[in-house]
Image (cartoon, rainbow, N blue to C red):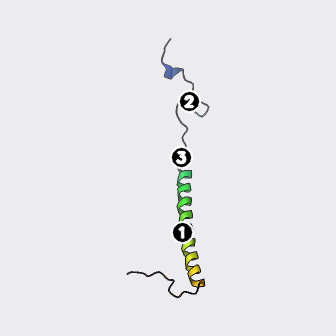
């Protein structure tokens, strides 16, 4: 009798041994999608805030609301 533990393991029905994690090519995809959604949400929130500030300035009757652009 052999006492080698690697030979006594029976493979799972998928053909993989119990110690190996399953191959999942989409494991990183949800993380990437979540990061893209967070960055997009922050970008949209800042753009909406700037737009609201500009609108508040215009509605208060000021004429110099546009930011100064330096070339």
Give whichever of discs 1 and 2 has the lower sequence position.
Answer: 2
In this view, the residue in front, 36 or 24, is 36
Give the image location of residue 66, x and y in percent: 49, 83
Residue 47 versus residue 25 in the image, above or below: below
In this view, the residue in front, 58 or 37, is 58
In this view, the residue in front, 12 or 29, is 29
Residue at 57 percent across and 63 percent down: it is 41
Q: Residues within 10 Å of mark 3 (few under 14, many from 20)?
A: few
Which label belongs to residue 10?
A: none
Q: Residues within 10 Å of mark 1 (few under 14, many from 20)?
A: few
Give the image location of residue 26, x and y in percent: 55, 48
Give whichever of discs 2 and 3 has the lower sequence position.
Answer: 2
Give whichever of discs 1 and 3 has the lower sequence position.
Answer: 3
Q: CA distance from mark 2 to mark 3?
A: 19 Å
Q: Which residue is mark 2?
A: 18
Q: Is residue 12 left or right of residue 64?
A: right
Badge nearest the viewer, 1 or 3: 1
Local SS, label 3: loop
Q: Which residue is mark 1?
A: 46
Local SS, label 1: helix
Give the image location of residue 52, x and y in percent: 58, 75
Discs 2, 3 touching: Cβ within 8 Å: no
Discs 1, 3 touching: Cβ within 8 Å: no
In this view, the residue in front, 37 or 6, is 37
Local SS, label 2: loop
| Residue 40 figure quarter | bottom right
Quadrant assignment for the C terminus: bottom left
Residue at 52 percent across and 54 percent down: it is 32
Q: Which residue is mark 3?
A: 25
Badge nearest the viewer, 1 or 2: 1
């Amino acid at each position: 009798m052999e006492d080698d533990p690697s030979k006594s393991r029976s493979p799972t029905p998928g053909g993989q041994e119990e110690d190996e994690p399953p191959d999942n090519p989409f494991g990183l995809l949800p993380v990437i999608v979540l990061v893209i959604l967070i960055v997009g949400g922050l970008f949209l929130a800042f753009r909406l805030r700037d737009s609201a500030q500009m609108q508040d300035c215009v509605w208060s009757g000021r004429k110099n609301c546009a930011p100064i652009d330096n070339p």
